[in-house]
Image: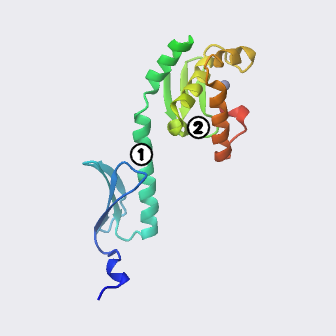
């Protein structure tokens, strides 16, 4: 006799694998028999292998796996973007100074980018990992422009408007910040 129960996942089975539509990698969850509290995740042979303690609830497992997959995928996407190369190309294309360094910032939640004018160090919010390249370029140009003109004003505007997609990118970022319920647009690209 068959019943719906026959197809239910057996919770005592130590391993099950699934593929998430949002993830490039299949995910394999291993429930440890040992009485430890360790959770871990790493990529093994193209599979995200997640280890969780056996006592973890299915709900906690789902949340943890989602977090882990998101973190790994974001890491992969940010690694795929060569910020240094992009920044150098934009400096060349728009006649701007080179940044001393340009890095992703995880802590920058209220601004898209920031620039330390004295040292030439630029930080870009990692919320921009997933925006289109032409939007990211606009934020990089904004920060590079601060190496010429530290403060916002007509002279600063003339520089950032050398980028033909400046207005369009500003609109795009305003829409994103609305979604994120972030700061008003005037603060966003400082
Ligand atoms: Zn600014």
Point 59% across, 26% down: residue: 138
Q: Which of the four quarters of the rendered structure image does ligand 1 lie in? A: top right
Considering only vertical position in the picture, is 138 above or below 49? Answer: above
Point 64% across, 19% down: residue: 160
Mark drawn on residue 73? 1
Residue holding disc 2: 108
Query: Residue 185 in the image: x percent, y percent?
Result: 71, 35
Considering only vertical position in the picture, is 88 above or below 37? Answer: above
Residue 64, by quadrant, is bottom left
Q: Which image quarter is the N terminus in?
A: bottom left
> Which of the two marks, 2 or 1, is nearer to us in this view?
1
Considering only vertical position in the picture, is 184 above or below 160? Answer: below
Point 45% across, 50% down: residue: 70
* Structural distance between the alpha carbons of marks 2 and 1: 19 Å
From this viewpoint, which residue is outermost toward the left?
A: 45
For mark 2, does the 10 Å Cα neighbourhood hold few (<14), some (14 to 19), or many (20 or more) residues? some
For mark 1, does the 10 Å Cα neighbourhood hold few (<14), some (14 to 19), or many (20 or more) residues? some
Query: Residue 93 in the image: x percent, y percent?
Result: 52, 13
Q: Is residue 100 visible?
A: no
Taking the image as shown, residue 60 lies to the left or right of residue 11, namely right
């Amino acid at each position: 006799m068959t019943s719906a129960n026959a197809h239910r996942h057996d919770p005592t089975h130590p391993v099950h694998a699934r593929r998430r539509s949002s993830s490039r990698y299949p995910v394999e969850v291993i429930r440890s028999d040992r009485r430890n509290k360790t959770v871990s995740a790493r990529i093994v042979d193209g599979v995200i292998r997640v280890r969780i303690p056996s006592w973890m609830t299915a709900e906690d497992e789902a949340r943890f796996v989602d977090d882990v997959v998101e973190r790994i995928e974001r890491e992969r996407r940010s690694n795929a973007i060569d910020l240094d190369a992009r920044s150098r190309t934009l400096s060349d294309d728009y006649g701007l100074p080179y940044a001393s360094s340009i890095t992703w910032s995880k802590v920058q939640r209220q601004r898209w980018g920031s620039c330390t004018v004295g040292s030439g160090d630029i930080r870009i919010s990692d919320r921009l990992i997933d925006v289109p390249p032409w939007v990211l370029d606009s934020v990089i140009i904004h920060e590079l422009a601060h190496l010429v003109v530290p403060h916002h004003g007509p002279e600063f505007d003339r520089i950032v408007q050398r980028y033909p997609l400046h207005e369009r990118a500003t609109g795009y970022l305003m829409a994103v910040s609305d979604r994120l319920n972030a700061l008003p647009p005037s603060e966003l690209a400082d």
